[in-house]
Amino acid sequence: MRVEIVLKIKIITNGEEMQEILICLEEIELKGQLFDTPCAKAIAEKLPIEAIPEEWGDEFYFEIPVTFPLDETSTVEVKVGDIGYWPPGRALAIFFGPTPISRGPDPVPASAVNLVGKIIGDPTILREAKGARKIILKRA
């Protein structure tokens, strides 16, 4: 059975919509926002992006063509629905539940991530896409 997820994300700058994008990973559709940060803007500038997603517990992560250091948003304290950029792997991480080092329901990244966005809606639906072989980020 093939499941396709489409994640709609809007970049918000000073309260104004900057760029809406889609993340396609099988057939589920979720909305989200990218924050007004230099790292999020660098990600938007590289669209479209196609990658092979990796899984780490209830986290999808995948390499993207962005190199960015940790910034003022960097943290190891993330919540279900957060979207982060992980500098050591040049990867985007989408958190939808606990990871292998979690001690409760919240995900814990392998190391600090820059918070670049969040999912609007129920991110746990992404569990249905585990095993997906392709993820696409593109402008809506």
Image: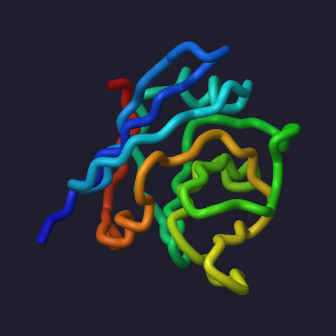
Question: Residue at the spot x=45%, y=27% of the render?
Answer: 47
Q: In the orientation shown, which residue stands out farthest toward the left?
A: 1
Eyeballing the image, is 45 above or below 25?
Answer: above
Given residues 73 and 24, the one toward you in this image is 73
| Among the 4 quarters of the image, the one containing residue 1 | bottom left
Question: Residue at the spot x=41%, y=59% of the render?
Answer: 122
Q: Which colour scheme is used?
A: rainbow
Would residue 136 be found to the left or right of residue 99 on screen? left
Q: In the orientation shown, which residue stands out farthest toward the right?
A: 72
Given residues 136 and 126, the one toward you in this image is 126
Eyeballing the image, is 140 above or below 90?
Answer: above
Q: Quadrant of the C terminus?
A: top left
Residue 113: image x %, image y %?
75, 53
Given residues 41 and 48, the one toward you in this image is 41
Would residue 102 be found to the left or right of residue 120 on screen? right
Residue 118: image x %, image y %?
56, 46
